[in-house]
């Protein structure tokens, strides 16, 4: 997707489009693409909007009759006064990986300066009723992640989420919390100090919800798609058979992202979800950070070595497909490669590493690759 600078006026109308009744994210993006801007969408009559294929009458009427402008203005004024950025899905600051998710939010509100498209991003999720085993595993994992340059994403909830964020703050790892309510509050309130520390130490708080939104139960499954969509992989630490963590893991699978799960004792209800994910091949078994290193290709940084291009190189069919795509398209982000070739991100990363070692491709900033 092309990164299009979005001015304040256009942000205003994109927020309004997201507030219009019966207008979902996919419909809103379709309208913006068809008419060129959200501002133009609101200039049109219901009849003109109905010219878009598949446009329902109730949606067109909701847009043409939209009157809740004060709420949108209040939202932007609050953001401006409190150092919150309103970022649209076509903006360069929007999380790159999330741009490839059809249901990625129209606009996200961000407090903090974390890189939302960092080179390596991992979501860590789990039960709110975390055991001592889960706490220990989470903290030990975070400590071992330090030299790998990974940004950790979670939901600031009780339990595993909070433990992950706290450990990141303690060990100096950038961490991002995706909230299920507006940025004018922190839920649970006991994590207010933690949230402030995260922002102060280079992390961020993200929400797609307005400041009038309360931490209602239905908001949290919705926010989980952002947790899954903006990361390369999702790790489930402890989880029952059902719950938000399993939803996040399944969303990550749907987005063709890698999923890991820490196994627990047979019969332990708080590990039942993790064990089932592994048993059903919906998650790779995670024991140590070496599992991430192996599957994701996230090796420890090494001093750059000169690469000598080989004249004859035997490639697998998938490696040939990756190389052909790069030669055809030029500079390509790894997310686009994964989606276009319908290969898991982990496989694409391994293929790119082999091609790079053979001097056939080169990596550029921002997880972009090109053929040599």
Image (spheres, rainbow, N blue to C red):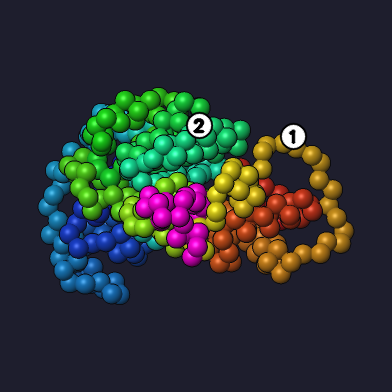
The foreground one among 350 and 363 is 350
Q: Say which label, 1 or 2, has the lower sequence index.
A: 2
Is 339 placed above or below 297 here?
below
Q: Which residues are magenta?
A: 259-280
Q: Which residue is mark 2?
A: 173
Q: Is residue 124 left or right of residue 34?
A: right
Q: Where's residue 231, x and y in %? A: 48, 48
Q: Residue at x 43, y 41 (%)?
A: 134
Q: Is residue 267 magenta?
A: yes
- Circles 1 and 2: CB atoms closer than 8 Å: no
Q: Secondary structure at mark 1?
A: loop
Q: Nearer the viewer, mark 1 or mark 2?
A: 2
Residue 176 seen in render: no
- The residue at 87%/58% (across/down) is 311
Q: Is residue 243 left or right of residue 349?
A: left
Q: Is residue 358 left or right of 66 when viewed as pictured?
A: right
Is residue 285 positioned above or below 56 on the image? above
Label placed on residue 41: none
Q: Is residue 353 visible?
A: yes
**Is 264 on the left or on the right of 25, as rendered?**
right
Crowdedness of circle 2 by 10 Å Cα count: few (<14), some, many (20+)?
many
Residue 175 position (above or below residue 273): above
Write the residue at 45% across / 31% down: 167
């Amino acid at each position: 997707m092309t990164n299009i600078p979005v001015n304040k006026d256009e942000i205003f109308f994109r927020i309004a489009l997201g507030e219009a009744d019966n207008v979902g994210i996919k419909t809103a993006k379709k309208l913006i693409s068809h008419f060129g801007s959200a501002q133009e969408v609101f200039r049109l009559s219901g009849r003109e909007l109905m010219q878009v294929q598949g446009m329902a009458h109730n949606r067109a009427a909701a847009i043409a009759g939209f009157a809740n402008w004060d709420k949108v203005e209040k939202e932007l004024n609050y953001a401006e006064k409190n150092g919150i950025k309103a970022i649209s899905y076509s903006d360069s600051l929007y999380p790159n990986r999330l741009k490839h998710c059809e249901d990625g939010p129209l606009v996200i509100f961000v407090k903090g300066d974390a890189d939302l498209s960092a080179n390596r991003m991992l979501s860590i999720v789990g039960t709110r009723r975390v055991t001592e085993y889960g706490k220990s595993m989470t903290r030990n994992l975070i400590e071992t992640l330090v030299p790998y340059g990974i940004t950790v994403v979670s939901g600031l909830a009780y339990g595993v989420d909070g433990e992950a964020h706290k450990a990141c703050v303690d060990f100096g790892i950038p961490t991002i919390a995706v909230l299920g309510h507006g940025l004018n509050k922190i839920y649970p309130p006991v994590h207010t100090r933690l949230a402030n520390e995260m922002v102060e130490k280079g992390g961020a708080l993200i929400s797609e919800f307005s400041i009038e939104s309360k931490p209602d139960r239905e908001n949290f499954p919705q926010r989980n798609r952002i947790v899954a969509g903006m990361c390369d992989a999702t790790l489930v630490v402890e989880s029952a058979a059902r719950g938000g963590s399993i939803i996040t893991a399944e969303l990550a699978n749907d987005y063709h992202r890698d999923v890991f799960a820490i196994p627990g004792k047979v019969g332990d209800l708080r590990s039942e979800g993790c064990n089932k994910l592994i048993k059903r091949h919906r998650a790779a078994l995670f024991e140590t950070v070496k599992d991430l290193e192996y599957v994701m290709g996230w090796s420890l940084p090494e001093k750059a070595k000169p690469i000598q291009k080989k004249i004859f190189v035997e490639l697998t069919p998938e490696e040939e497909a990756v190389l052909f795509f790069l030669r055809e398209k030029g500079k390509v982000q790894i997310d686009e490669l994964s989606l276009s070739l319908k290969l898991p991100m982990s496989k694409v990363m391994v293929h790119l590493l082999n091609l790079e070692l053979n001097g056939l491709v080169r990596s550029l900033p921002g997880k972009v690759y090109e053929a040599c």
